[in-house]
Image: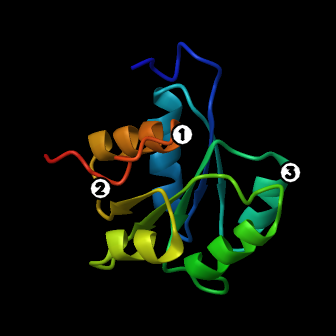
Amino acid sequence: MESAGTARQRRVLVVDDEDAICDTVAIILEDEGYSVATAVNGAALKVAADSPPDVILLDIMMPLMDGPELYRRLHLDPRTASIPVVVMTAAGNAHAWARKLGAVAALQKPFGLDALIDTVARAITSDPDAGEQPSG
């Protein structure tokens, strides 16, 4: 598999209400060669529409506008409707949320470094196994 650093720089939008998660995920993915933007709640709609990312990492549980509502609105906008979404949640049902919403993959918080990197790479290439997290 080609690493993110050898191909055109891929863009990731991280949507979470916790700054620490946004910052940590951004650092990890930037180290892998991705360009990363972060947003909270509904602000993600403008960020995604203005500069569509290759994938969106979307927290399910957020105040004001939760992940399912944000996902719904992203898919109503033709500029963002086709962007793959990976749901993230600390609730014990990340994969159920992914199936319910139609997301390409899920990350159960807390997730490991390898799971994050692998899931983002697979989501960008639309690998049908993107939702499978490596163990360990």
Q: Give the residue at mark 2.
A: 111
Amino acid type for the residue under numbered disc 1: Ile
Looking at the image, which residue sits at the far top? 6
- Residue depicted at 29% across the width and 62% down the height: 110
Of residues 61 and 97, the one nearer the viewer is 97
Q: Residues within 10 Å of mark 3 (few under 14, many from 20)?
A: few
Amino acid type for the residue under numbered disc 2: Phe
Quarter of the image with the N terminus in it: top left
Q: Give the residue at mark 1.
A: 124
Q: Nearer the viewer, mark 3 or mark 1?
A: 1
| Mark 2 or mark 3: whose residue is earlier in sequence | 3
- In this rendering, the answer to whether 37 lies above or below 6 is below
**Residue 39: image location, x then y, percent:** 67, 61
- In this rendering, the answer to whether 47 lies above or below 53 is below
Of residues 32 and 8, the one nearer the viewer is 8
Distance between mark 2 and mark 3 Cα atoms:
29 Å
Q: Is residue 57 left or right of residue 73?
A: left
Distance between mark 3 and mark 1 Cα atoms:
19 Å
| Mark 2 or mark 1: whose residue is earlier in sequence | 2
Secondary structure found at label 1: helix
- Residue depicted at 28% across the width and 39% down the height: 114
Q: Is residue 110 left or right of residue 88?
A: left
- In this rendering, the answer to whether 14 lies above or below 3 is below
| Tag shown at residue 56 | none
**Residue 103: image location, x then y, percent:** 50, 63
Amino acid type for the residue under numbered disc 3: Asp
Looking at the image, which residue sits at the far front? 128
**Residue 23: image location, x then y, percent:** 52, 50
Q: Give the residue at mark 3.
A: 50
Secondary structure found at label 3: helix
